[in-house]
Amino acid sequence: MNAPIRRLSVLATMLFAMLLLSTTWIQFAKAREINAKPDNRRTLLASYNRERGSIIVAGEAIARSSASTDELKWERSYPLGELYAHVTGYYSFIYGAGGGIEGADDDLLSGRSDKLFYRRVSDLLTGKAPVGASLELTINPAAQQAADKALGDQRGAVVALDPKTGAILAMVSHPSYDPALLASHNLGAVEKNWLRLLKDEGNPMINRAIAGNLYPPGSTFKLVTAAAALESGDYTQDSRIPGPAALTLPGVEKPLPNHDGQACGANDETTLLHALEISCNTAFAALGMKLGPDALQEQAAKFGFGKVLNVPMRVTASSVPTGMNEPNTAQAAIGQYDVRTTPLQMAMVAAAIGNGGEVMSPYLVRRVLGSQLQTIDEASPKSLGEAVSTSTARQLTTMMEAVVSQGTGRAAQIGGVQVAGKTGTAQHKVGAAPHAWFVSFAPASDPKVAVAVVVEDGGSAGSEAAGGSVAGPIAKAVMEAVISS
Amino acid sequence: MSIVTSWRPRRGRNVELLLLIFAVAIVVLAYVSVEGATHGTIPANLATMAGGLLSIAVAFHLVLRFTASYADPLLLPIATLLNGLGLVMIHRLDIAEGRSITGGMALRQLTWSALAVGIAIACLLWLRDHRTLRKYTFLAGASGVALLLLPLLPFVGREVNGARIWIGIGPFTFQPGEIAKIALAVFFAGYLVRTRDVLSIAGPKFLGMQLPRGRDLGPILVMWLLSLAVLFFQKDLGSALLFFGLFVAMLYVATERIGWITIGLLLAGGGAVIAWMLFGHVQTRVLLWLHTWTPEALAASDQLAKGLMGMAAGGLFGTGLGRGRPDITYFAESDFIVSSFGEELGMTGLFAILMLYILLVERGLRIAIGVRDGFGKLLAAGLAFSVALQVFVVVGGVTRVIPLTGLTMPFLSSGGSSLLANWTLVALLLRISDQARQPLTDMAATGPIPTVGARR
């Protein structure tokens, strides 16, 4: 019977070898993945054991951790709650970190990031309690407040950029919520709040500025069409182009009309400058068909369409559909059909024009700070490439200045400052009021701020609204706040 | 030509004593480290605890010195170390759950440990020759089956966590399956040593494999049905697997015929498929095993996921005793105690524990090879292999090698019946090893082999 016993002992060894393998698989190979599972209470508890870094705007913490007496040693608070909700996001014991910087830079705030490795080692050696890194943001508090106040109870979003660097100066999405509702250690209440926010038909937890509802850009997209025309070399701001009261599209029964049902100039003709100034639909639709879908798409891509950006929050890519026929192209050229953008993307278009054609990568974190508020890492502006040439940018600026000084965007005029802008009124659903848009930058000659505003369903003015009257004053308020600060 | 030497066989008792002190030292160190991490102090009762543990171990050692002086020197230290580590972990979980010393599980476990060691010593004193057990073959078989089926009876049987494997009389609960394991091993050994000649007669050849005769299939079919009954009526996948696996392994050792293993695997596979088709709880187990992280599985039960998260949190070197959160895992002191160790001692620590088990198993099998009588060989091999199977079923279940079943980890898990059974198992192995390692010259002194009613 000894031979089978020997074989049995080999079998037993094999069984144990399998156990060693499976243990290695879980504790070594897959450990990181399992630790990162969203509902892993141990990882959460471990991160609560360490002081989480603050999120700072202009020297003031808009998210900070303070010691608490319960099992979770640190409690997160948001002193300015709703104002910065979509910037900070939330840090919840049940639902994890998300909704903004809290989620996107969780590694840094919690101190887990590899960037903090040397600091961790030195903390270990000096016996200091490890602390997460703090983040100083690029937000201009005056601009953020102005945007929040001007948008008021209307649904929509405001984004402001520094055109020269891409630094995000304001990011507001309404309706908002108070992240403290999710950060509380009263877990029962947190769960109730979470469900209530999820069910809210206003979707307060969605950051409309960068994600969620993508909007049709409406007439603000005419900037892209105009840029493509100027870049083609066949046009200047003074080129004469057709601008009838209504444009017949090939194969489509109903012609495409202008808002006011009038022709855009004498003899159904207009200049490129004037067409933009009065936001002439037929002129840009015809222009779009002439340039073709590829030219529109290429120009849009140069402005950043189709790119997924991390600011550090993930920004949904804006898009111009592929394979468009002529009528589709005509519609796309005036920002309708299936063109979809984020407000941030439209702000980037305005910023690029103001910045002499160069698109800067948008970012929200200026500096990463250690526990003694010493700088660990500092953001450096990054270029995403040249969207248009300097001369095209100059002509577009002139055209946009005309929009504000004597065209559809007069509501955004600021005394003593040259403002360049473009209005938009985007049809998005049959029977619903259109979205009101406004994109702009100022001062036109040496811009300090570029803004995109969208007000859903025309805001309080209802379906009569044009982008200028509803969104224009909001953009104006934000630009004023930046210029005077 | 022969060389005459005054060679004395090494009994290994001194090695055993040294290892025992070593084992107790590790346990004490673990205890200090738990207290240090949770209370920040060195426990006040350290000397009492260390002294008590050491004196129990040394008492056992002395019994071996006088009644089984050739016994294997590794078994006792390994069992002591595992038992001690289990105690420390259970104590550590008591602290995490806020249970007091008197109301905690560690004290109960300690009481059971002392009782189990006492019974193991009694066993060694009573059983001077393992061959005596052969006389009780059928008594063991009958009581094994009875113990196995006891929880099914009304009034005494209790269903705990979905498995009806407990009996309860008043406030006392007991899991008789663990004791049944030993009784059945004795029965299989006694039965197979008698029938092995018949069972190994070659039957038809199939695909180049020698199958047994059809008329000899009776015993394996009976065992199969019994295992299925355990599975169906008690919903106890682990025990069914353990008993059937144990029988097939011993059948193979007795007959040396691979054919039996083939038939056993086929029957086990068939039983598993039938169980999977018929029973919702088996399907749930399979779902949890294969798709642990899917929302459907997590909605059904997140106990496996929680255990895995604990092990992952431990990583390579663990959080350190008293510094993790094993209390987040359900059944952290029983079915999932392996996860608790994985979390706080890391992969390294878990490897060390698994090494202790494989050492225990391989020593047991070595004893089986060394012992001279067939009954002893079968019994030792069966007992040793049952430990291997049980560890595989438990750790394999927790680490997703096989579906999770409800067995306890020998020596580590909280539970009196498990401790009693496993210490008795060690006592039997020690008794057999005493004969296995004894030189033939000494054998004469122990008297003739007792005759038993063999029909051969």
Image (spheres, grey):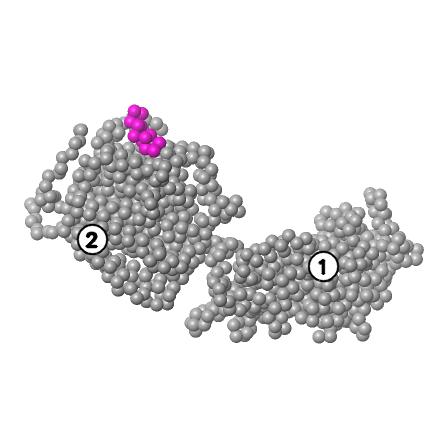
Q: Main secondary structure of the magenta part?
A: helix
Residue at 77%, 58% in the rendered image:
A459
Q: Number of marks in the image?
A: 2
In the rendered structure, the answer to whether residue B120 lies left or right of residue B347 reads left
Residue with the mark numbered 1: A156
Viewer-proximal residue, A443 or B404?
A: B404
Viewer-proximal residue, A414 or A459?
A: A459
In the rendered image, the vertical position of residue B310 relative to residue A407, given as above or below: above
Residue at 38%, 38% in the rendered image:
B234
Quadrant where the C terminus of chain B is found in the figure: top left
Disc 2 marks a residue whose amino acid type is Phe
Residue B147, quarter of picture:
top left
Residue A391, quarter of picture:
bottom right
Viewer-proximal residue, B267 or A254?
A: B267
- Tag 2: Cα neighbours inside 10 Å, few (<14), some, or many (≥20)? some
Q: Secondary structure at mark 1?
A: strand
Q: x and y percent of residue B69 in the render?
A: 15, 50
Residue A172 highlighted magenta (yes or no) = no
Q: Secondary structure at mark 2?
A: helix
Viewer-proximal residue, B415 or B205?
A: B415
In the rendered structure, the answer to whether residue B382 lies left or right of residue B340 reads left
Question: Does residue A394 show up?
Answer: no
Disc 1 marks a residue whose amino acid type is Gly
Identify the magenta region: B213-226
Residue with the mark numbered 2: B60
Q: Nearer the viewer, mark 2 or mark 1?
A: 2
